[in-house]
Image: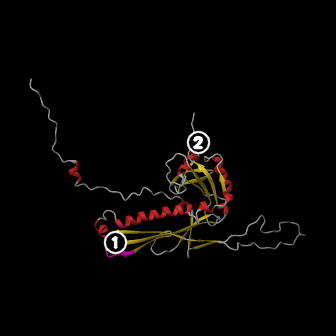
Amino acid sequence: MSEIHERPFEINTLTREEAYQLADVTKTRPQYGALTPKWLTRFIEFKALEAGIYRVNKVVEGDAPLDALCTNDPRKVEIPQGRVPYQRKPREYQLAGISTIINVDTRVSDVYSSPYDQASEQISLAIESLKERQESQIINSDDYGLLKNAVDSQRVQTLNGAPTPDDLDELISKVWKEPSFFLAHPRAIAAFARECTYRGVPPVTAAIHGGNFILWRGIPIIPTDKLMVDGLKNPKSKSGKTNILLIRTGENKRGVIGLYQAGVPGEQSRGLSVRFRGIDDNGTASYLLSLYCSAAILADDAIGVLEDVEVGEYHEYK
């Protein structure tokens, strides 16, 4: 009996590798993994400045700063006299500048700018990077950062480390005049949600400014990785400590406000300037990007800080 040798079935057709040479590849814009939604700068109220300086004039407060007559006795007609004293040396905030320079080889941008313009994409990514730094500075700046400028009387400690409903209620007692939002690292928000679930009081959610946020006592809890855990934006360990802020925003509410310079040359958005610096002898185009910003706390009770928040507590459910 003769052996039958089977040959693999082959079709002489166009291969994927050959077809790839004629295909139009659909491309994305450059994806910058470090970008965040930057919710803080969306929720906080901003004030435009004309000359880069913002003076916070305060009244010297006391238990009864001004006496007044309150009676229906016609014999008491002497109305108290007085004045409301102003703070002699009010604090002045000066805008800080965040700047960078972007260089683009014109030979590269001339040839490789379809479908996306290379200079525009470079500038766009740089702008987002500056805005990331702006949010970080509003929270962590040694000069005007919210964490450093919160007064001691507005700071509270967690009861047992993990952020509980009781802890956030204590924070509300510090910022009870129209609080606007909590601000916390995503890990801290997750830790708080676990504590609520463990106690049988899971928080509700709401859609605000195009995002979905959990609420506590009707106040949204806004995420930011700029409130770091053990000094890190993205900690690898399951445990770690951070802070949670409660903020009242708005100038009319004597709250926290962001500051920016209005009408800067080359203005692209709030306080952001992009200016073309020219092309050098080597054909390199240069762009200067500057973002002018600061923040002010108009009253001590406009911000509260929950300190030493442990993010690594977990529970076993039966």
Q: Is residue 175 visible?
A: no
Q: Is residue 285 visible?
A: yes
- Residue matched to label 1: 284
Label located before the other in sequence (1 or 2)? 2
Magenta segment, principal secondary structure? strand
Residue occupying the point 50% across, 59% down: 38
Mark 1 nearby-residue class (10 Å; few <14, some 14–19, many ≥20): some
Residue occupying the point 48% across, 63% down: 131
Q: Is residue 279 magenta?
A: yes
Dividing the picture into quadrants, the one containing residue 84 is: bottom right
Which amino acid type corresponds to the residue marked 1 in the rendered image? Thr
Start and end of the magenta stretch?
277-281
Q: Which of the two residues, 88 or 23, is positioned nearer the viewer here?
A: 88
Question: 192 above or below 8?
Answer: below
- Residue matched to label 2: 197
Q: Which of the two residues, 200 or 244, is positioned nearer the viewer here?
A: 244
Left or right, 179 with reference to 7: right
Dividing the picture into quadrants, the one containing residue 128 is: bottom left
Percent position (x, y) of residue 287? 40, 71
Which amino acid type corresponds to the residue marked 2 in the rendered image? Thr
Percent position (x, y) of residue 303? 63, 59
Circle on res. 35: none
Left or right, 112 with reference to 4: right
The quadrant of the image that shows the C terminus is top right
> Element at badge 1?
strand
